[in-house]
Amino acid sequence: MTAISRVLVARHAVRLDVSDKSWACSSPTPYDPPLAREGEAQSALLGRAIAAELAAAAASSSSSSLPLPLHAAAHVAAGDHDVSLRSSASDTSASSSLSSLSSGATSSPGSESTALSNVSSSRDQITRTLNVHVHASPFLRCVQTAHHIARQIIAAMPSSAPVNVQLRMDAFLGEWLTYDYFTNVSPPPDDGHASIAASSLSWLLSQGDGRLLDRAWPLNKFGNSGEYGERWRSMYSRFSNGLQALTDYYSTSENNVIIIVTHGAGCNALVGALAGKPMLLDVGLASLTVAVPRKGCKGDEFTPNYGYGGEKRDRSGYAVYSHHHEDQLTFLPEGSTSPCWDLTRIADTSHLSVVAPYGVESDRAGSLIYDLYR
């Protein structure tokens, strides 16, 4: 059985400061906008697409390690939002939760599935617990997007196919802290994203979904946040190192799906790491990349040989490549010359074609490029 059956990389949905240009002027935290109303709709569609992806994976595998097909988010589509968050994380006080975010507490990959470990299976019905690990940047827009994704997955899962969904915030998935992003607003506090994570936790508690978050999870488990003035190469390495640590962590247990919710620049770094080559993509809002283990690879490991695609960037935030051959990124499995992951979807936004935010008629609503690439 494969330890990690899927790695999914998603960009957050549209931010409030994009649809409401005046928002940043009145907010005490202009560097951390929430989702816009349109972004909430995008996130729900993204969650349904991910649920369908898991269902398709189950249906296409004769010896599937995934549970029975999902119900295509029928409960949510019908307006049923009274969803039970099946998680083994304990419900502790808000004060202890805030302190644990920056603590050195550790947890093991299999600990969150203990409550469901005694589930039986039969020849005609697969009931093995699917462990869905949603890792998000601590920035509110990413946590909100991840929250919508988790609720859609839980709502779509039939009771006969147990699923354990848990949300974890990771500092290494935070925004690229280039000077260019903060010319009109103040940058985040220099505290490793601890205050941003605390704010996102408060929002989760206000939604009544505190149990969804693994509060014992340390922010710096897989690496630190970037520093203000971070260069492209440093950001790329931050995400790549974190991804390797993340996949290594779950390689010791079975039946895992990893969902990563982060920012545009980080999506480029992660997709490049998974593809084994430099990537410079039009990463649309609420877009989805799916990676599956490559057959013949030993485990889910890859060895990074860091390089980067140059530092010069245009106004939209895209890198202008001026690299040499030796600067290219390669992420290769040990003892192999090919990546350990195959990409079945890359920055896909087809799931958003049913809606167009801001009244714009477009079959690629999620690929609209806004004035800030984040």
Image (cartoon, rainbow, N blue to C red):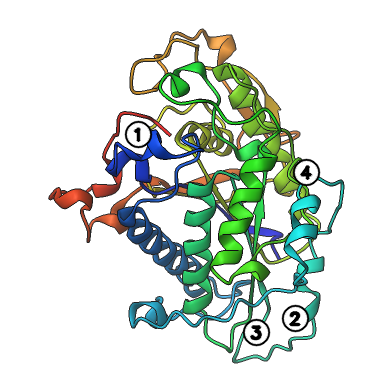
* C-alpha separation, residue under disc 1 versus residue under disc 4: 29 Å
* Amino acid on which disc 3 is placed: Thr
Indicate which label's residue lies in the foreground, 4 or 3. 4
**Image: 166 above or below 141:** below
Would you say residue 284 is visible in this rendering?
Answer: no
The dot on residue 116 is 2
Percent of width and height locating residue 167 = 63, 60
Q: Secondary structure at mark 1?
A: loop
Indicate which label's residue lies in the foreground, 4 or 2. 4
**Image: 348 above or below 241:** below
* C-alpha separation, residue under disc 2 versus residue under disc 3: 10 Å
Q: Secondary structure at mark 2?
A: helix
Q: On the image, numbered disc 1 is attached to which residue?
A: 282
Counting residues from the N terminus, which is met first, the one under dot 4 or under dot 3? 3
Labels 1 & 4 near each other (Cβ < 8 A)? no
- Number of numbered discs overlaid on the protein picture: 4
Labels 1 & 2 near each other (Cβ < 8 A)? no
Q: Secondary structure at mark 4?
A: loop
Who is closer to the viewer here, 109 or 357? Answer: 357
- In the picture, measured across the screen, residue 121 lies left or right of residue 329, that is right
Report which quarter residue 319 is drawn in: top left
* Amino acid on which disc 2 is placed: Leu
* C-alpha separation, residue under disc 1 versus residue under disc 2: 40 Å
Labels 2 & 3 near each other (Cβ < 8 A)? no
Indicate which label's residue lies in the foreground, 1 or 4. 4
Counting residues from the N terminus, which is met first, the one under dot 1 or under dot 4? 4
The dot on residue 221 is 4
* C-alpha separation, residue under disc 1 versus residue under disc 3: 38 Å
The dot on residue 127 is 3
Residue at 83%, 59% in the rendered image: 108
* C-alpha separation, residue under disc 4 versus residue under disc 2: 25 Å
Who is closer to the viewer here, 98 or 261? Answer: 98
